[in-house]
Image: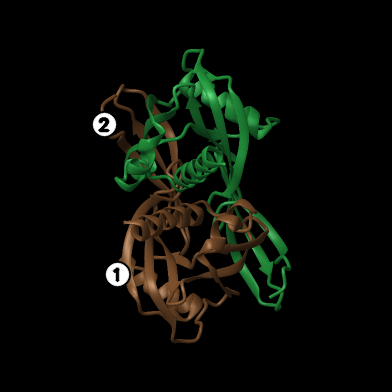
Chain colours: A green, B brown
Amino acid sequence: MADERWERLSSEKLFESPYFSLRADALRLPDGAVKDPYYVIERKDAVFIFPITKDGEVVLVRQYRPAIERMELCLPAGLVEEGEEPVEAARRELREETGHGGGEWAEVVSLASSPGLKNNWAHVFLAHDVEEFASLEPDEFERIEVVIIPTAELKRLIYSGDIVSSSGVAAIMVCMERLAENSSG
Amino acid sequence: MADERWERLSSEKLFESPYFSLRADALRLPDGAVKDPYYVIERKDAVFIFPITKDGEVVLVRQYRPAIERMELCLPAGLVEEGEEPVEAARRELREETGHGGGEWAEVVSLASSPGLKNNWAHVFLAHDVEEFASLEPDEFERIEVVIIPTAELKRLIYSGDIVSSSGVAAIMVCMERLAENSSG
């Protein structure tokens, strides 16, 4: 199977909001078949931060998620704003959501958030030696609780269903793997 | 912070398709603030299957993803249809996308696909000893290539950016962890 793109014959914007937009494309497949409509949700890229304190604990956030009608415990995360580099967005979100910053940062992996429907990517950062240095600045409708736990508890919280988001779980598991490699290497 | 739900004061369906729908809610937070509109993408639950052959290899699928304009290598996956149990959907998707079936199945974890925007869950199944027993039955616009590789190569394919979906990476990492626990336990 060739690596060819599907050709976009036309594209119509069906809905726009500050959070995402929706378009309907007509696509021609490499074998000539035409898929019309093919819907795509356009959304800004996201950042997920795995922030480790000098004490070796991880800084998480707990908040209500209306789409799934339950609380979610997860890594600090947010969307990359216009003109920001992903690492800038990651440092901003960590500060706004948890009051933490500083430390040594590395981008670990980039994930496609929902490639069957959405066009955006989630950039995952591992931050060592972060410190609390500011007060929280949540967005107007964010109600965030900061939860600091030993990193060794993360996998249990995934298996127990407390940490549920796909991008968050992927980010945690990949960062834990990276930490294990570094400590054994 | 209390575990209270945000009360849905009203809800309007803005868009419907066979693949997802979009609604705008007005929500009252526990502290009385009102968030209006709050957008939610409604989508059927998904299933992701980590299928291991008798030879200890994993069966993957490679397909073009128009939303991210590139090929994606991932676990077999799909949506749960009306009236199906997730495990039935998982067995159907594995058969349709790869021609494989049989074996011993266990549900490992359920993930919220994109809890900041979408309401659906991804149910992850680990299937041991699957065998090829049927021809592929892809959907009309699916162009799927089956890729069978040793499970030990999966992490390299995540780090290299070949396997990119959040749910797929989360599913792979959690299942690999489960396999490591079982083999050491």
Front one among A178 and A58: A178
Is residue B5 or residue A184 the one in the foreground?
A184
Dot 1 and dot 2 residues touching (CB under 8 Å): no
The chain identifier of the residue carrying mark 2 reads B
Q: Position of residue A18 (x, y in %)?
A: 57, 36
Q: Position of residue B9 (x, y in %)?
A: 31, 36
Q: Can you give x and y, in whole percent of width and height, for residue B173 in the image?
A: 46, 53
- Give the residue drawn at x 58%, y 54%: B158
**Looking at the image, is A30 positioned above or below residue A84?**
below
Tell me the CA gap for discs 1 and 2: 31 Å
Q: Nearer the viewer, mark 1 or mark 2?
A: 2
Circle 2 sits on which residue?
A: B3
How many residues crowd around disc 1 within 10 Å: few (fewer than 14), some, or many (20 or more)?
few
Q: Is residue A105 above or below residue A28?
A: above
**Helix, strand or loop status at disc 1:** loop
Q: Mark 1 highlights which residue?
A: B83
As helix, strand or loop, the secondary structure at mark 2 comes to loop
Residue A136 appears left or right of B108: right
Q: Amino acid at mark 2?
A: Asp
Which is more toward the observer, B138 or A160?
Answer: A160
Q: Is residue A44 visible?
A: no
Q: Residue sitting at 38 percent across and 64 percent down?
A: B126
Looking at the image, which is closer to me, A48 or A126?
A: A126
Chain label for disc 1: B
Q: Which amino acid, by three-letter code, is at mark 1?
A: Gly
Circles 1 and 2 on the same chain: yes
Q: Is residue B125 left or right of residue B76?
A: left
The spot of residue B103 in percent (x, y) is: 35, 76
Q: Is residue A98 above or below residue B130?
A: above
B23 lies above or below A40: above
The C terminus of chain B, quarter of image: bottom left
